[in-house]
């Protein structure tokens, strides 16, 4: 499934739409080194961390997009960095668990 | 075996905003010269963790990338102190001395050095109050 199809099926709000990458799974986590160690390419990453460094982690791990959960918000500088990297940022007002369930129900 | 490429990158203390920049640059360089995605990814993870360690724990430092004519990739991460008092503890997954501020940002999982060690093919670490040096080697695993 592509990121755009995933957005359509989940109803997550698009903060920035970058490259329309393949989504092959989901990873949830907020401890960056943990995510760095365990995340896999083409996963959608659900987190509540929204500072600049999440962009570095997502790019290095080759995630397909970041889904920010629990009504957290991306600062402007983070959105700018994502644009430079072509990385899609999404926003979910649901808690992490429900956000993951919605992705599961969408077929990710 | 001789070194055919060398580049030195600086990492500044407390420079959270640019954390990940060096690993991103190194990953791009490796991909450009034809190093496989799998090896590039392992190197990038190790560089990222070394950068973070320098930013949150050390007084900054340098990361040197060397590539040899036999395809060996070597990374030397050298910081300016204050050193790691107990290296064995620092290598234990989950052990962290990160500040509260760093932890709130999602750092300090205690997975930095373990991630580096797992991704490198050769790993050595030396530390004193004058600084810590990581010497890492990577090559294709096929």
Image: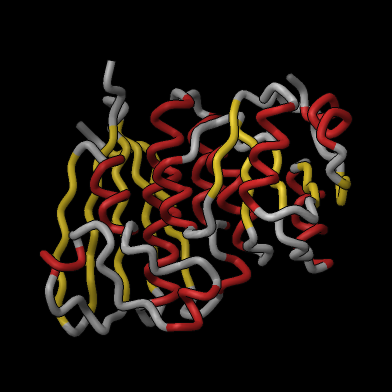
Residue A89 position within the rendered picture, expressed as x and y whole percent measured from the top left: 78, 48
What residue do we see at 39% from left, 71% from top?
B54
As drawn, B39 above or below A11? above
As drawn, B129 above or below B53? below
Question: Which of the 4 image quarters holds residue A10?
Answer: top right
Residue B1 position within the rendered picture, expressed as x and y whole percent measured from the top left: 20, 31
Viewer-proximal residue among B108 and B38 = B108
Residue A106 position within the rendered picture, expressed as x and y whole percent measured from the top left: 75, 26
What residue do we see at 71% from left, 47% from top?
A67
**Does B18 sit left or right of A86 as displayed?**
left
What residue do we see at 47% from left, 69% from top?
B11
**Does B79 sit left or right of B7 as displayed?**
left
What residue do we see at 24% from left, 35% from top?
B2
Q: Residue furthest top?
A: B142
Q: Quadrant of the C terminus of chain B?
A: top left
Viewer-proximal residue among A52 and B35 = A52
As drawn, B30 above or below B77? above
């Amino acid at each position: 499934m592509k990121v755009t199809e995933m957005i359509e099926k989940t109803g997550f709000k698009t903060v920035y739409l970058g490259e329309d990458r393949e989504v092959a799974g989901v990873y949830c986590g907020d401890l960056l080194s943990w995510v760095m160690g365990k995340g896999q390419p083409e996963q959608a990453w659900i987190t509540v961390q929204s500072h600049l460094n999440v962009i570095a982690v997502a790019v290095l791990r080759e995630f397909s997009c970041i889904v920010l959960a629990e009504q957290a918000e991306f600062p402007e500088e983070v959105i700018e960095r994502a644009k430079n990297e072509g990385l899609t940022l999404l926003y979910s007002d649901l808690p992490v668990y429900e956000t993951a369930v919605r992705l599961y129900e969408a077929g990710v | 075996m001789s070194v055919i490429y060398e580049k030195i990158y600086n990492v500044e203390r407390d420079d959270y905003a640019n954390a990940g920049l060096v690993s991103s640059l190194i990953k791009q360089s490796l991909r450009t010269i034809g190093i496989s995605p799998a090896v590039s990814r392992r190197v990038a993870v190790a560089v990222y963790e070394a950068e973070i360690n320098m930013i949150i724990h050390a007084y900054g430092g340098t990361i040197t990338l060397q590539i040899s004519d036999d395809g060996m990739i070597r990374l030397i991460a050298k910081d300016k102190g204050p050193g790691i008092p107990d290296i064995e503890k620092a290598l234990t997954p989950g052990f962290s001395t990160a500040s509260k501020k760093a932890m709130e940002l999602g750092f300090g999982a205690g997975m930095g050095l373990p991630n580096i060690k797992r991704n490198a093919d050769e790993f050595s670490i030396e530390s004193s109050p004058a600084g810590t040096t990581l010497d890492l080697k990577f090559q294709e695993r096929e």
